[in-house]
Image: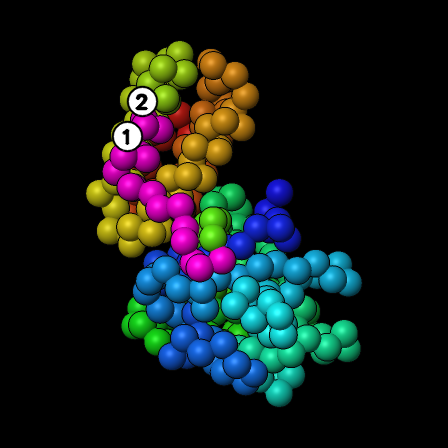
Amino acid sequence: MFPNPSVHYRILSLQSGQVLDLSHGIVKSKNFAIQWNWNNQPNQVWSFVIEQGYYRLSAVKAEKDPLVLSVSNGSTADGAEIILYPPHPDALDQFWSVVADPSGCAFSIVNRKSRMCMAVQNGSLAPATRIVQNPCTGSWGQKWIATEVTGLDGTAAEFEPAASLAAIEESISRSVPDPDLGELVGRSIRLLEREPLPDEVKAAVASRVGDIMNELGGPAPEPHLIRGWLNKIAAVCRPVSDDLRADRRVQNALG
């Protein structure tokens, strides 16, 4: 189940690989949400609290006196900044929907009041860029990946992207009966390994790829399931998609 209210998460921008954080790492009311490099700090850790059929994104460091992500002044304006604020049941700007990306590997965070998406301001890659709301366009700056944090101090289960990808490729080679299709899936994994995405994003995608492979259901997946998997991984990785589809065998496999 995701989001799991009993789990703590770090939330990564799919575009930058940086995590949802707070300005200067300070957990206080009205402080701004920003993106920053993961540095194993509790101010970078969040929980999804279910209420009224939506989620509040609560700062784990402020659990004794809860603070949640809100839109500044409850605004419905494009570009309004995301801040911390004490929860209030009538503050609709404090409630969010989590909408899965078609790839299955990422999600959008949509505000209940404004119907806008949480986004990195101007799609920037720069650390300390503020988090805002924008009309939902499906841009990479509006997509997020979450990985579980195992301790309240910010300790997170770390991935070695190359090692994770290699393990998945080995598993695929054993489970896909058609050698050609098996090679295509393996090749897509190798392309992902050299894809110029941030390592944190690669790691999260690699983990999700493992889940997708498990969802294929059985040691010898049917070709149409493999085609579905190829489509999913191609949707996640921008240059990988072009490289895969340029291969005639991939075109045939994708139908």
Location of residue 227 (image quadrant): top left
Q: Quadrant of the N terminus?
A: top right
Q: Position of residue 207 (x, y in %)?
A: 41, 39
**Residue 166: numbered disc:** 1
Name the residue rendered at 37%, 60% in the picture. Answer: 40
Kind of residue at disc 2: Glu
Q: Amino acid at mark 1?
A: Ala
The residue labelled by disc 2 is: 170
* Residue 223 appears anywhere in the view: yes
Q: In the picture, residue 245 is in which quadrant?
A: top left
Residue 157 % position (x, y): 40, 46
Horizontal side of residue 170 vs 68, given as left or right: left
Category of crowding for the residue at label 2, using alpha-carbon neighbours closer than 10 angstroms: few (below 14), some (14–19), many (at least 20): few
Q: Note whether 111 is above or below 101 in the view shown.
A: below
Is residue 130 visible in the rendered image? The answer is no
Q: Where is residue 203 drawn, in percent x and y?
A: 35, 45
Specify start and end residues of the magenta stretch as a single range: 152-170
Q: Is residue 41 magenta?
A: no
Based on the picture, tell me whether residue 160 belongs to the magenta stretch.
yes
Which residue is most to the left? 194
Q: Do residues under tags 1 and 2 come within 8 Å of each other at their CB atoms?
A: yes
Instruction: Check residue 66 in the rendering and tell me which mark sits there, or answer none.
Output: none
Residue at the (31%, 72%) spot, across then down: 127
Q: Quadrant of the C terminus?
A: top left
Q: CA distance from mark 1 to mark 2?
A: 6 Å
> Could you say where residue 186 lies in the image, as x and y percent from the top left?
30, 27
